[in-house]
Amino acid sequence: MPPRISVRLEQASPAVFSAYCIAASFGVYFCMYAFRKPFTAGTFSGVELYGLDYKTVLVVSQVLGYTLSKFIGIRFIAEARPGRRAASIVALIAAAHAALLLFGVVPSPYNFVFLFLNGLPLGMVFGLVLGFLEGRRVTEALSAGLCASFIVSSGAVKTVGQALLLWGGVSEYWMPFVTGLVFWPPLLVCVWLLAQIPAPTQADVALRAERTPIDRVARRALLRRHGVGLLLLVAVFTLLTILRSVRDDFAVEVWSALGYDKTPSVFTISETLVMFAAIAINGLAFLIPDNRTAFFTAIYTILAGFVVIGLVTLLYLGGGVDGFTYMVVVGIGAYVPYVAFHTTLFERMIALFRDRANLGYLMYLADAFGYLGYVLVLLAKDVASFEANYLRLLIGASLAVSLASLVMMGLAYFYFRRQTDAARFEQPALAAAHGS
């Protein structure tokens, strides 16, 4: 017999159902960030490992674990069974928190390995949460709410972490573990609420295609059908991940270079502005009933984001905008496309082509290579004896990513336009959906 909350959700209005799902998924992923990102609020200055800046070593270690987790997740998330998702989320986060305990116990510079172990389980949490939301008529709105968590939560947990450093008397090495302790109670409540979400309805399946675990044969069939297009999309997502991660992981250093040293609130304020813009733009995509129109609208949205990144960077270099405006607008320009991949692009691609697929598989395929690209950039930075000017790195990355991504996304547009023009796609009747 289904739990009482699940039954009520099945009978709830779309607005109430959406609000519940957004609150539960947002809460889970927001809390997860408390076990992943607080360490970046520290600088770990004065410590090196084999001549490498120790904060870079820590970031690379965690991202390596997170990247490996994404590659593992390509199969794990694609084949994950719905009934095991909630317990898996709790187990993965508990393992990550245990690694933070050891990070505090073991002295530097020998504790970097525990951030690798911290990232290893956390990389699979997003796909498990996303599995509760995909394949529904309102998936874009639900996914946008989920994506809001990883935009605003990174800044929020940095604020908590830096507050513990400045006013709580906690060391840089124990601060990540202590931050995690604060977030366990809300995490458990939100995971339980998430587990009550019912499966998609028949009308959802009719409009968005059935989402089932997919085996190796189905994954290979999907890659054969859309190989070139997926390659271009993954390449663009990789560049987006690099830009987003540089801006996020070295935000303390960039804000300091812009004159916002020892101002913890700037992280939350800036990322809240970015969140509202990215979510408002992408969350409305569920209002577009036609899958083909929504799919190409997502491509246009992504292209526009790269134009914004390039223009605001040139304006900043020319003195046309101040540092705060630059950081916020670059964040909007990066996160609008980044969120579009999560909310609309892959979701509507599956619905449009009616492939046997699920959103988690496509996102983990893109995520795995995205984080791998970021690791390579971090390693290249230190091997090349890069001077620690992260503002300059962000500016250079913004210009390079915007230009290269405009070219590749343009090619992807023509590829998928040709695919959709080559065959007729029969969209499910809207009447069937509204009659449910």
Image (cartoon, helix red, strand yellow):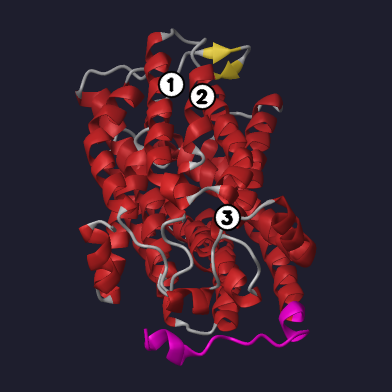
Q: Is residue 406 visible?
A: yes
**Residue located farthest toward the front when viewing the structure as drawn:** 1
Residue 296: x %, y % from top left: 60, 77
- Range of residues picked out in magenta: 418-436
Q: Amino acid at mark 3?
A: Pro
Q: Nearer the viewer, mark 1 or mark 3?
A: 3
Q: Earlier in the sequence, mark 1 or mark 3?
A: 1
Instruction: Find the distance from the CA under tag 1 to the CA under tag 3.
Output: 30 Å
Which x, y percent locates residue 314? 57, 59
Q: Quadrant of residue 374?
A: top right
Closest to the observer, 96 or 57: 96
Query: For residue 203, which numbered disc appears in the image?
Result: none
- Look at mark 3 in the image and give the residue it sits on: 213
**Which residue, given by chain and number where applicable, does mark 2 sit on?**
117
In the rendered image, residue 412, in percent from the top left (x then y), is placed at: 72, 69
**Residue occupying the point 59% across, 61% down:** 310
Using residue 421 as the reference point, say whether residue 382 is left or right of it.
Answer: left
Q: Report if the CB atoms under discs 2 and 1 are less than 8 Å apart.
A: yes
- Neighbor class of circle 1 (other Cα within 10 Å; few <14, some 14-19, many 20+) is many
On screen, 399 above or below 389? below
Residue 73 within the magenta-colored segment of the rendering: no
Amino acid type at circle 2 is Leu
CA separation in Å, label 3 and label 2: 27 Å
Looking at the image, tell me whether mark 2 or mark 1 is earlier in sequence order. Answer: 1
Does 421 appear above or below 361? below
User: In the image, what residue type sits under mark 1?
Assistant: Ala
Badge 3 or badge 2: first in the primary sequence = 2
Location of mark 1 (residue): 99
Q: Position of residue 199 (x, y in %)?
A: 40, 63
